[in-house]
Structures are given as C-alpha cells and as structure tokens.
Amino acid sequence: MAEECKIVYQGGEGVLVEKKSRFIATVAPAQTEEEALGFIEAMRKKYWDARHNCFAYVIGDRNELARCSDDGEPQGTAGKPMLDVLLGEGIHNAAVVVTRYFGGVLLGTGGLVRAYSGAVKAGLASSVIITRIQGVKLEISTDYTGLGKIQYILGQRGISILNPEYTDTVQLEVLLSEEIKEQVKAEITEGTNGQAELSEIKAVRFAKIGGVPTVLEKEEI
C-alpha cells in the first residue's frame, strides 16, 4: 500500500471552448471500477444530446486499473490524452468524463488531443485534490515541563497538535505518517528525557484539508 497517494477529495467541472466546440470536463472520486462506470453512465444521461462523452479513470493506489474511451472520436485523440493527464498528475481513484458539443469546425488530431487534455486539466483545477497519507494517530501525555520541548519538535516538522487537553497533565494528539513516526517518537522521548508517554491509538489515513490534518472516513479513502 502506498504511504502517500494523491486523490480527488471533491470533484469539479471545467469548461474549454475550442473553435466553437465546447468541452465540459467533469471529475469525480471513484474507489472502484463500479463507481467509475456508474459515474460515466450518469454523465452520459446528463449530456445525452452531446456528440461525444469520452472518459478515463484510474483505480488503485498504484493505478492497478486504468481505462479510457474515445467514444467515437478518432482513435487516440481523446481517451488516451485524458488518461495521460490523470497519470501525469499522479491522481489515483478518480474518473473524468469530457463531454463535447461539436461546434462545426474540425480540430484535427493535434487539436483534439490538446482540447481533451486541456479540458481535463481545467476539471482537475476546479476539483479538490488532496494527498492521502498512511500513518497513525499518536497520543502524547506530558507534564508542563516537557510541553515546550514537544511543541518545538512538532513545530519544526510542521505537525499540528489536535485536541489538546490541559489538566494536571497535558494530553495531545498528532497525526504522523509511517515514514516519520519512529523519528518523531524518538525525538520526543529524547527531548523529554523519557518523561512523555507515547501511545499509538490506531492506524489511520489522513490528509491536510484546508491546511488542517483530517482523518479520512472509509468512503473517502
């Protein structure tokens, strides 16, 4: 399982107009092929009167499943360029449909490739893309003497403190990636001379959403 993975947290829509043809790119998260196909069918129904509804989707932490369709456009001018954008951006678990309303002017193969690629980029730009991280929720218990050192260690790494509780002792929670968790635990232990108590609550997948570390629910991962 990949420790870090870029995914679509919230889909979006982008529009590109090229020589009177209108390209509407709709992006959505998709955890399974069934979800991707359901989304594609919904877009076909929504834009039933369009000339083309081309699609591409990538499923899996390592893009184990990647599919695309030109939907009647010349072979290799729509689906493949769309898929190339998703793969090039490192996006996982996502589907995109680009709907084309023909404007009466032929674009040529190069023009089609640029239009479909550009539409997908516009759709991604209007979506919320996050980096999902595999890690742990760590609980830190310390006395007030060790608090400043812990805050300094976490601050140096840009790690946010969650749900602090200040009583006779201080209870803190942090989200740490698998990559750095042992280093951070060692630094806290050394920095507090072993006085801080560290407890891994559970394995989680999380991401920074609006700058705030957030544990992702099952359906979001």
Image: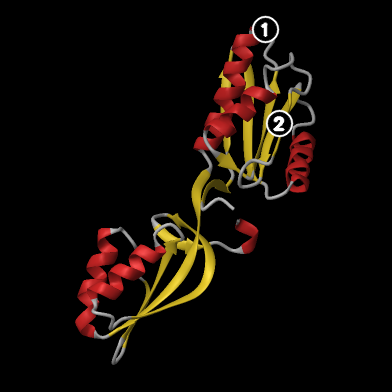
Measured as percent of width and height from the top left, residue 130 is found at: 49, 49
Please tell me which residue is depicted at 71% across the width and 31% down the height of the picture.
Answer: 55
Q: Mark 1, residues whose alpha carbon is within 10 Å: few (<14), some, or many (≥20)?
A: few
Q: Give the answer, above or below, for where 197 lies relative to 150.
A: below
Q: Is residue 14 visible?
A: no
Measured as percent of width and height from the top left, residue 67 is found at: 72, 33
Q: Quadrant of residue 143?
A: bottom left
Please tell me which residue is depicted at 73% across the width and 43% down the height of the picture.
Answer: 36
Q: Earlier in the sequence, mark 2 or mark 1?
A: 2
Task: Name the residue type under label 1.
Answer: Leu
Please tell me which residue is depicted at 70% across the width and 21% down the height of the picture.
Answer: 101
Q: Nearer the viewer, residue 112 or 42?
A: 112
Task: Name the residue type under label 2.
Answer: Phe
Residue 177 falls left or right of residue 188: right
Q: Give the answer, above or below, for where 9 lies relative to 99.
A: below
Q: Residue under label 2, please give it.
A: 55
Disc assigned to residue 63: none
Q: Residue under label 1, please give it.
A: 106
Q: Is residue 202 visible?
A: yes
